[in-house]
Amino acid sequence: MTSTLTISHLTKAFGPVRALSDVSLRVDPGERVALLGHNGAGKSTLMKVILGLIAPDGGEIAVCGSAPGQAGARAQVAYLPENATFHSALTGVEQISYYMRLRHVDPAGAMDLLDRVGLAFAARRRIGTYSKGMRQRVGLAQALIGHPNLLVLDEPTSGLDPVSRRDFYELLDKLAADGAAILLSSHALTEVEARTDRLLILSGGRLVASGTLPELRREAALPVAMHVTALNGYEPDILAALPDAIRVNGGLHLTCAQDEKLATLARISALRSKVADLDVIPPSLEDIYSYFSRRDGQ
Ligand SMILES: Nc1ncnc2c1ncn2[C@@H]1O[C@H](COP(=O)(O)OP(=O)(O)OP(=O)(O)O)[C@@H](O)[C@H]1O
């Protein structure tokens, strides 16, 4: 498959600060990829390079087959900045029509675009009266002008309430299903865990992890936690059989290495006449994220 975005050995420094070091990645059509990283990890710099707003110091980058910033790339890439601002005196439909004219697209389609992002009902109201979620939808509507093949979204859901976030991701799902590639940065780990296909973790300008959550979970091989609830009166027996367990929240908590998981389950299973319940808790995305970020010395 021809990728929508291909980056090889990209580097960028600002004076002594190495904002990006030897970053290589690709994003394919229809893929929803989350870009994670601490403040200052290099996410915005990477996005600016993709958009052609700043030039890299080294490496190669192809955006829909063109160099960043060239007409071929610009026509196919859409960007939603973290804090998109619009003219508060314009209505939604006026603002989108204006952007369409700037992009040499027929503004007659402005209402359709607003309808796609669920804003048709407020299209003739001034943007100054919109909520943050509605303004974010205006931003997404402007990003959809001209059917982009690559959407670059900088923390698109920050500040949105849970329902607006869910609606936003449903819209992204539809765009991806139509073949658009989506690269979005976020600090909301649990949200991207559920709503994207692949995770990229930047740390100190380096790409320290890339893969689906199960792939990263396997690679990190972090300990698995188990929570055992004893039947009335049997807790001392279980503690004696599982000496590593500690009392937590009315139950017994223990951890084991990934490769000891089955053996530990077998030991708990042998106590089944004394056990009321068992929960196996895999490492969270926060654990995996910390593992990869720390591994790079952050
Ligand atoms: N124009 C610039 N001049 C000097 N240093 C810069 C410039 N832009 C970015 N940097 C530095 O490059 C590094 C990466 O910054 P970048 O904005 O890409 O991080 P980020 O991951 O987007 O952070 P955040 O999550 O806070 O937005 C930081 O150390 C930052 O201070």
Image (tube, rainbow, N blue to C red):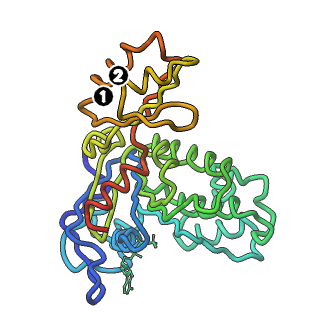
- Image coordinates of residue 136 in percent, x first then y, are 63, 62
Distance from Cα at disc 1 to Cα at disc 2: 6 Å
- The residue identified by callout 2 is 265
Tell whether label 2 touches label 1 (CB within 8 Å): yes
**Within the image, what quadrant is residue 280 found in?**
top left
- Image coordinates of residue 48 in percent, x first then y, are 39, 74
**Within the image, what quadrant is residue 30 found in?**
top left
Between 98 and 122, the one nearer to me in the picture? 122
Q: Residues within 10 Å of mark 1 (few under 14, many from 20)?
A: some
- The residue identified by callout 1 is 261
- In terms of secondary structure, where does tag 1 sit? helix
Residue at 40%, 74% in the rendered image? 40
Residue at 19%, 76% in the rendered image? 58
Give the amino acid type for the residue marked by disc 1 in the picture: Lys
- Image coordinates of residue 194 in percent, x first then y, are 49, 42
Q: Is residue 212 visible?
A: yes
Between 172 and 288, the one nearer to me in the picture? 288
Q: Quadrant of ligand 1?
A: bottom left
Between 134 and 20, the one nearer to me in the picture? 20
Location of the C terminus by quadrant is bottom left
- In terms of secondary structure, where does tag 2 sit? helix
Residue at 42%, 31% in the rendered image? 226
